[in-house]
Structures are given as structure tokens and as C-alpha cells.
Image (cartoon, rainbow, N blue to C red):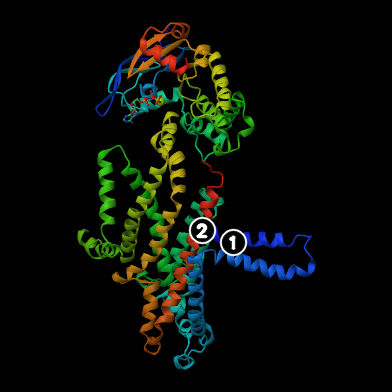
Amino acid sequence: MSDPVIELDHVNKWFGAFHVLKDVSMRVGKGEKVVVCGPSGSGKSTVIRCINRLEEHQKGRILVDGIELTGDVRQIERIRKDVGMVFQSFNLFPHLTVLENLTLAPNWVKNAPMKEATETAMYYLERVRIPEQAQKYPGQLSGGQQQRVAIARALCMKPKVMLFDEPTSALDPEMIKEVLDVMVELAHEGMTMVCVTHEMGFARTVADQMIFMAEGQIVETAPPAEFFAAPKTERARQFLGQILGH
Amino acid sequence: MSDQSSHNPKTASEIASHVEEPSQAELHTHRRNAFAGLGWARDNLFSNIPNTILTVLSVALLVWAAPPLLDWMLLKATFLNEDPAACREAGGACWSFVTVKHRFILFGLYPYDEHWRPLLAMALFIAALAISCDSRFWNMRIVYVWGLVLPVCGILMWGGWLGLTFVPNDKWGGLPLTLILATLGIVLAFPLAVLLALGRRSDMPAIRAICVGYIETVRGVPLVSVLFMASIMFPLFLPEGLTIDKLLRAQLGIMLFTAAYLAEAVRGGLQALPKGQYEAADALGLGYWQKTRLIILPQALRLVIPPIVNQFISCFKDTSLVIIIGLYDLLTTAKTALADPSWRAFYVESYVFAAFIYFLFCYFMSRYSQYLERRLNAGLRR
Ligand SMILES: Nc1ncnc2c1ncn2[C@@H]1O[C@H](COP(=O)(O)OP(=O)(O)OP(=O)(O)O)[C@@H](O)[C@H]1O
Ligand SMILES: [Mg+2]
């Protein structure tokens, strides 16, 4: 495997006295797709939020594209430029139009001229199939549309990695597909992705690796075919049983 | 309030339009409209027993208070006759007092022959304020407007240039003084308040401690004592020979005081903003000040327009406390105008006049805040 884009090396994190991540290690290579799953409260969100320093880890090392995450603010901002994130609750900026949401960061963080930023924004809006909504405010869009705007917003920064934290769990069932379609397309284009999701169909289609977490630890890492057919641990078997409704 | 008042006429007109359907016989229309009025009254004034009691009490109060008030204010009032004796004879309000004294009340001790200068300065100032209320000017243009208006006002008020005689600012008074103290107090307090509110939520303990300390200290003392300190104690700390003008000290006192309260209002907005907004901005790589300026403040400030305007109104009225350090603001000039023995009896008229001016400004601020809230939230549905 070439140099990993993301490398976690025995990462530990505490919330006060609560040990939420215990010796978490993983490597994500360029173009690799990793799906993280596990029961609620197992620390999935915390792991991927550590990757762009929305959460701070206390022990171990995290490297993104060869740069180590430390307390250095400039380092953090540099890494964040290269790491796109999509949240469960979209977190679009409601006071800005869709287009402004997309051009803001390229314009201010990467100093892209407005004309160029607008062209990039329109390109990605077309990619997520809602160019006609460019002048609307997020509050005027459906949940599925908002999440696609959020994906486009992250892509406008031309990130090297995309992090997804349960991007479809806040959506009505009929909107889940339109978001997953966009994600599958993105995966096929070779984007490096780390997704926390319970959409096992999606995981089967795109994942190179499944990571199963429980109680702050990585319990199992396996390619999806293997993971779904024959989980090695009892915890994973139980979890799959619940989630696939057997 | 406004909800109800906009709702009521609608109900009435709905009923009316229902009644006026073409199938109704023309002859009956008139009678039925009267009936619709009754229906409206029943729905809105007598819908239940407490409501009925309130309606009856309100009507009784009106009947009891309105005629004598009207009598005093208009029917028996004297307007133009500049003789106090005529006022006493008429028995009503003596608006002649205002006719005679309005220039002193409005401009204080400013040299009488030069009153056109504060008048013009005030007109410019109010025009600039009006322009500032228009969102089309919320860019560099507003800076140009004030960059032009403030120096011109300064030249007009102080003079000593372009053939204008010099008027030291301890001769300033009345409405211009109140307007200057309030507007500059608010305008200067606002950025300070935003910084204090941000500092209070800072990750850095030292900055947080300073901001909390400042806010809590200032909120713990009344404005009167802040003004006293500004005017009496502050000079004691200054090096020998250096003096700061009394007006400037009052201005600083009002600004520092208002900032502490405003900071708490702003903090409310910062807290009300969902955490996801901060995280999304962070995740995009925006720096602290970019995030604050582009994402956080535009949303947080909109959320707290009502308490902010509340603070503005209260600052405007509180400027009247500068009386205690001997500045002639609007309320003080209204009081001083009564020192004239022949008009001493008409203090009610004097205060009503001053109150009316205060009311005009405060009422406008309150209406403007309602308009602003509606406008800014128009596109914003969460
Ligand atoms: N800011 C915080 N302070 C204290 N505890 C926290 C904090 N954030 C998360 N936790 C705790 O850490 C644990 C892991 O949380 P995390 O959000 O990573 O779980 P998750 O696997 O993403 O769960 P879910 O599937 O419900 O999203 C949980 O027990 C949670 O209560
Ligand atoms: Mg989670």
C-alpha cells in the first residue's frame, strides 16, 4: 500500500474520566473507502471527528497526508483544508444562499477569486444534481437536497479525504437514495472516504474495508464480503443480526 | 400585540365578505354589515367572561379619563399667547411655555444667535441615522456617510473655523447633546460588546477571566456611580496636567456601561446558535475570525435584535443621568427652563414636551427593530 492518507496510531481519548477511544489504530490509503459501523455510543463519531480535530485526542498519533495533528492551529487549519466533512444534521449556513455556502470557504480559506469559486460551485451543484437551487436558502430545500448541498460544499474545497458521519440518518426514507447515489458516484471516482453509516447496502457496494467498533475499540476489520458473510466476533454477529433485521 | 391587531381586522373582513355574497339580497346588506360588526365585537371583545370584564373596564377608563385629558391638552390649552397670565386664565395646558422656551430646551446654553448650527448638525445627524437604517447602505457607503457627517457636525458644533465662532462643548446642551451621547455611546459600545461576548466564551482562561470580570463588575454598579467615577475619580488617576474633557468622560462612561449589558445580550445569541454551525465552519478550515465574522455573528446578532434594541433604548434614556455631572442634556434643559419665575408653574408641560421627544426616538427604534427582525428572518426558515 502506498503512503496512507489517514493514519491513526494507538489513539486514545477521554471525555473527563470516560475512556471513549481505546488504542484505535487504522490506515486509510489513497482512494480507499472505509465504512465504520458499530452500536450507538461505540465512539464512531468521535473517531472521525478526531481526524479533522473537531475533537482532540490525548494519546497516540494521527497523521493526515503525512502531517501530524498537534495543538498547532496552523497545522490544524492546513489539514482541515484537505479534509471534507459531511454531518448528520447537514449544518448548512442558513443565512447564506446555497451558492454562497459553496463559495465561502474556497474564497476565504483558499483565496480563490469569486468567479472561479462560483464556477467550481456550479460544477459541483450539477454533480449533485441541484444546480437550479443555487440562489435559494438552505431552509427552502428538502433534507435530501440540503445534504447534497453539504456534500457539494465539502467538495468545493477539493479535499483529499471525505468524512461522512451518518449522512443519511436524519433523512426521510425516500431521500436516502438520492444522497447515497451521490456518494456512490463519488466513491467510483476514486475519492478517499471514511463513512460512518448503517446503510449496509452502500457498504457492500463501495467499501474496501469494514471497521466494526464497540465500546471505544476497533473489534474487527475486514473486507465487506468477509465481514457480512462470516463475522469473526460474537459482538459483530449480534450487531449485524440487529441491523440487518434477522 | 401586533399579531392580534393584524388578525382582528382580517376576521372582521372575512365575516363581512362572507355576508356580502351575491346571493344575499341587496336590501339586507346594510343591516347585515352592522350585524357583522356585532359579530366581530362578540368574537374579540366579549369572547369570554374575563375578556368581557376587561372590555367594560377599558371603556370605563376611557370615558373617565379621556374627556378631561382632551380638555386639558387641547380644548382649554394655550398655544401661542406668550403671556403666562393668559395660560392661568385658560386653565388648560400651557403650550405657550414650549413656544417661548423650546429653543432653550432643544439647544441649552448654546449661544442663541448660533442655534442654526446645532439645528443643522442635528438634521445631518438624524439624516445619517436614517440612512444607516437602510440595509442598502450596509457596506463601505455607511462609512463614507458617517466619515462625512461626523466631521461636519463637529465643525458646526465647535466652530472656530470657516468664520464660525468657537463654542466650547460645555455650552452644548439639549437634544444635540442627548443624541450625541446616546448614538456615540451605542455605536462605540457595540464593537466592544461583541468582543466582550466573544471573550467570555474564549478558550483562553485569561481572556475569559478579564471579560467576565469586566461584565460582572459593571453590571454590579448603577450608571450613576459609573458617571460619578468617570467625572470625579477618573481624573485623579490621570497624570498631572492632563485633563479629559467632561463630555468625553461622560461619553466614555456611558459607552463602557452600555457595552457590558450589550455583551450579555450578544452572548445570548452566541449560545443560541447550534453547535453544528461552529463545527461546519471549523471543518471547512475557516480561521477563528473568519468563522466569527462570516458565520457566527451574522446569525447570532439576528437572533438577539430585540434585546439589543432594548439596550439601545435604555441607553438613549439613561443619557438623562448626565445631569449629575452637570451636563445639559434634553431633560436637564427642560428642567432648567422652569427656573424662569414667570413660567415656574408649568413644569408638567415642560416634562411632557421632553417626554414626547424621548418617546419619538424610542418608539421609532422599537418599530425599526420589529421591521428589521421580519426582514432579516424572511429567508431564514430552520
Ligand atoms: N462531548 C462529549 N462529552 C462527554 N461524552 C461524550 C461527548 N461526546 C460523546 N460522548 C460520549 O462518548 C461516547 C461515544 O460517542 P460517539 O458520538 O462517538 O458515539 P457513536 O458511535 O457515534 O454513536 P451514535 O451511533 O449514537 O452516533 C458516547 O458514550 C457518548 O455519550
Ligand atoms: Mg455518531
Distance between the alpha carbons at the discs numbered 2 and 1: 23 Å
Q: Which residue is mark 1?
A: B8
Q: Amino acid at mark 1?
A: Asn
Residue A243, image x and y in percent? 45, 18
Circle 1 chain: B
Q: Amino acid at mark 2?
A: Tyr
Circle 2 chain: B
The front one of A27 and A165 is A165
Residue B352, image x and y in percent? 44, 77
* Residue at the (26%, 46%) spot, across then down: B210
Q: Quadrant of the N terminus of chain A?
A: top left
Residue A201, image x and y in percent? 52, 15
Q: Which residue is mark 2?
A: B368
- Identify the secondary structure beneath mark 2: helix
Give the vertical position of B77 relative to B306 (above or below).
Answer: below
| Left or right of B291 in this view: A119 | right
> Residue A47: which quarter of the image?
top left
The answer as to whether callout 1 falls within 8 Å of ligand 1 is no
Q: Nearer the viewer, mark 2 or mark 1?
A: 1
How many numbered discs sit on the rendered protein?
2
Image quadrant of ligand 1 equals top left
